[in-house]
Structures are given as C-alpha cells and as structure tokens.
Amino acid sequence: MALPEFVAFVAGLMALNALAIDIMLPAMGEIAAELGAAEDNDRQLIVVAYVLGFGFPQLIAGPLADRYGRRPVLFVSLVGYALMGVGCMFARDFTSLLVLRFMQGVFASGCRVVAASLVRDIYAGRGMARIMSLVMTVFMVVPILAPSVGQLVLFVAPWEWTFGVLVLGGAGMLAWALLRLKETLSPERKARLTVRGVLNNYRTVATTPVTLGYMLASGVIFGALFTFIASSEQVFTGPFETGETFPLWFAGIALTMSIATYSNSRVVERVGMRRLSHGALIGFILFSLLTLIAMQVSESLWLFFPLFAMTFACFGLIGANFTSLAMEPVGHIAGTASAVHGFATTTIAGSIGGAIAARYDGSTTPILNGYLLLGFATLAIVLITEKGRLFSSR
C-alpha cells in the first residue's frame, strides 16, 4: 500500500472501535428504555460493556499476531466483529445486548492490536508518532460523524440499524484487507508460541521502564476520553438541553481533537514527542481547572463548550505521542507490546471513565473534578517515568 492508503486503512481499523461506541450515543436512551434497563444511568453500560470486552483479549491477540502474522488475526477479528453486530440487531433484552456488546469488544480488540502492530512493523520513534498522528487524524473523523450518522439512522429506521452500520463497516474492512493488505511480519520475525516465550515477552514489556510508565500514563489520561464518551449524551442533553443537536456539539469536540492531532503530525519530528505531550498534559490540567471554575459561576453551554474543547485539544497532543513513546523500546515484539499496551490502557481507562461517568448528577462538576484528578495522576506517573525531568528533547 502507498502511504495515504496505508494511513487510511489503519485509521479504518481503529475507527471500527470508535464507530462501535459513538454511533449509538443518540440511541442509548431509546435502547435502554426498550430493552428494560433498570436505572437511567444503566444506559452507559452499552458503552462500558463494549470497552471492558475490548481489554483483556488483546493479551491473546498480540502473541497470536506475533506468531501467525497480522493478516490471519485480523480476518478472524473482523468476521467476529460483524457477526456480533448482527447479534446486537436482534437482541431483545438488555442483558443479552450487553453480552453481545462485550463480545463485539473482544473481536474489536484484535483489530486494534493489528492496527498498532502494522505501524510499528514499518516505522519507529518520531516517525511512528507522525504516522500515528496522521492515523488518529483520519480516525477522529469517525467520532465527528458517527453520532450524526446515528441520529440520521434513527430518523429513518429503528435503533437496531445503528448496529447494522457496524456490520457494514466490519464487512467493508474485511474486503479491503483481503484485497490490499500484505503481511508485514517477515517470516524470520515470527515468534514461537510457547507459554514461556509469551510470558517472557510480557515480562519484557512490563519491565521496560519507559514502556510501562507511558502505558500507565496513557491508561489514566484516556480515562478522560471514556468519561466524555460515556456521559456526553447526558451532559449535553441534560443541563445544556441540546436535544437533537447533541451530535453537532459532540462533533465539535471531536473536530478540535482531530485538528490538534493533525498539528502534532506536522511538528512532532521537529519538536519531539516529550516536549509536545508534556506541555499538552499541563495544558489539559489548566483548562480542566478553568472549566471547573467557570461552571461554578455559570453552567452555560456557550461558556462550557470552548473551554472543554480546548481541554480536548490538549488531549489530542497527548495520545499518539504517549503511545509511540511506550512502543518505541519494544518494536521487536510489536504484537505483544501492542496487546499489553492496548489491554492496560483500555482496562484502566474504561474502568476509570466508567466510574467517573457514573457519578454524573445532573451537573458537570463530578466530570470536571474527575478530569483534574486524572490530569494530576498522569503528571505524577510521567514525572516518575522521566525521573523528575519534563520536556526532554529525546
């Protein structure tokens, strides 16, 4: 594949995950009501169940991708993703839907592992950060459009067809992979699939200080993203009363992140991953604090939105750089490293994000308090990882 097609393909794989979360945000209330969810906040479980399923299986998909190659793991993952989407379309009770969503997350995890492995197979260091930023820029188009697509689906069809879009997405990516994707793992780099070998690779990832530190930092700060995704529909349609225009406000936040991520791709090779991400992390903390203070004065949408968008602009300069910093020292076991990184970050972020979102009480205060806590915790982890030194040019 040429570079533009490669970036689009990897972004498409990663976008399946965002699509599975974001497209049903406008439908969550309707789904929960029709399938008999017990509490109003239970609608968040439609997202949380998927995210939890997305975590642990990456630890299995990674070693399999290092042993058998990227293509076979990807094919199985895409077929399973689409089939679980079909199952969700025909779910008739809330528990069954959550189980199917969990399993869809399981198969989506293989897509995520392969996507990161493909990039690390070909690129390293600041070059990987540049490519990941481009991937994330394209990937962020999905959160911008998905809620609006979901709302359009609801205008013309029942909520089941929000899952039908996922079926079509999985089938489309499968066809693209079958026709265009070549194996990027050379035969001499294929790892032996033994319990000892897998455990040794896991140990290598867990005992590489930079990898471990930025993996944990990514998990904590990504908790802010999962908090936003899980609670955004309630926040925007609740205190801010946006109604059916909610997808547009959600898209505005995602667009801000996308612009920041693209900007990162343009300057990261010159400025450096650490300088950009460390500065953005401090900016994230400051804007979170400023938004919290402003909301105590007046909980106005026109005050909240620009400040919150700037918070997520800072977030857009963190994600790709933290991921590249974590992956850089362990490129020789990219599949396993991607799996551990994906499992740790998703599990930590999903658990933290779900816990913070569950504290939503009709105001933005619990969410913004959570953001401040996440920002300071991430900064502490980065300081420990870098031995007290920030903004290094390395």
Image (spheres, grey):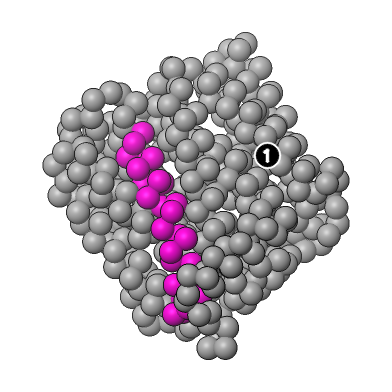
Drawn side of residue 391 relative to residue 296, left or right: right
Residue ID at (35%, 43%): 49
Drawn side of residue 221 relative to residue 362, left or right: right
Residue 230 location, quadrant? top left
Q: Taking the image as drawn, is residue 134 in sight? A: no
| Above or below, 358 relative to 148 | above
Kindly identify the amino acid type of the residue bearing the numbered disc 1.
Answer: Thr
Q: Taking the image as drawn, is residue 27 in sight? A: yes
Residue 47 location, quadrant? top left
Magenta region, residue range: 44-70
Residue 282 x %, y %: 75, 37
- Compare residues 53 and 157 and report the one nearer the observer: 53
Residue 272 x %, y %: 79, 58
Residue ID at (60%, 41%): 220
Q: Quadrant of the C terminus?
A: bottom right
In this figure, which residue is indicated by the disc labeled 1?
A: 378
Does the magenta-highlighted stretch encompass residue 259? no
Residue ID at (26%, 46%): 99
Q: Secondary structure at mark 1?
A: helix
Residue 179 location, quadrant? bottom left
- Magenta span: predominant SS is helix
Does the magenta-highlighted stretch encompass residue 51? yes
